[in-house]
Amino acid sequence: MRKASVERSTNETKIIASLNLDGTGTYSVSTGIGFLDHMLEQLSRHSLIDIEVKAEGDLHIDFHHTTEDTGIAIGEAFSKALGDRKGIARFGQAMSPMDETLTRVTLDASNRPYLVWHVDFTRDKLGEMDTELFKEWFQAFGQAAGLTLHIECLYGVNNHHKVESCFKGVARALRQAIEIDMRKANAVPSTKGVLGGSL
């Protein structure tokens, strides 16, 4: 079983994150930010990655530190659980519709982090959460997880639907990318023999 736990403690946040990449999509999430909890639950359920996250942060200031550091901790646990990334399919993609919204996600678990983000919002907040923080979460998660991550909301009106389709799309793409290809279960999916570094 590909499992890992990470504890991250700073003057701003204290976070414990545990992942099982070969899970069933069960979750226990508590960040103190209701909307972020809801999105992380979607990430777990649709990726089939079991996720446990407990975060305490300086929410009296704003939600930035807790959002970003939660992304970092989950990403670090993800990368740790993948190990040398032998046998994985590596690439994943998903078209994620939610009512009037359609989001396209394409990713490469290449250990070369990069985020392309084409998602526009017409509101500053969803619940109490600033919509600009969703990009920060995916940036932090992708960087720590070692993902080349392209997220594009092709169209949509409702801002809640836009965000949720992003998380569900990333979840489905992750599910593809980390699946073990039994034809190459003991090989790193790269002509270099390792994942990461230069092209």
Image: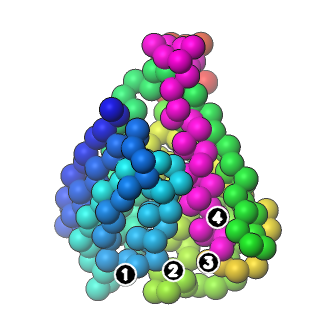
**On residue 53, which mark appears?**
none
Asked if residue 172 is among those painted magenta in the image, a careful observer would answer yes
Read off the residue under disc 3: 160
SS for tag 3? helix
Q: What whole-number distance in Å separates the C-alpha atoms at marks 3 and 2?
A: 12 Å
Asked whether the residues under the numbered discs 2 and 1 touch, taking CB atoms below 8 Å apart as contact, a structural biologist would say yes
Q: What whole-number distance in Å separates the C-alpha atoms at marks 1 and 4?
A: 25 Å
Image location (x, y in percent) of residue 36: 44, 71
Q: Residues within 10 Å of mark 2 (few under 14, many from 20)?
A: some
Mark closer to the chain start, 1 or 4: 1
Residue 136 against residue 85 in the figure, above or below: below
The residue lying at 59 percent from left, 84 percent from top is 124
The residue lying at 47 percent from left, 81 percent from top is 129
Name the amino acid, label 3.
Answer: His
Read off the residue under disc 4: 165
Q: Magenta segment, which residues? A: 161-190
Name the amino acid, label 2.
Answer: Asp
Read off the residue under disc 2: 130
Q: Does residue 145 appear left or right of residue 77 in this picture?
A: right
Q: What whole-number distance in Å separates the C-alpha atoms at marks 3 and 1?
A: 20 Å
Residue 84 against residue 107 in the figure, above or below: above
Nearest to the observer: residue 84 or residue 196: 84
Read off the residue under disc 1: 62
Q: Residues within 10 Å of mark 3 (few under 14, many from 20)?
A: some
Q: What whole-number distance in Å separates the C-alpha atoms at marks 2 and 1?
A: 9 Å
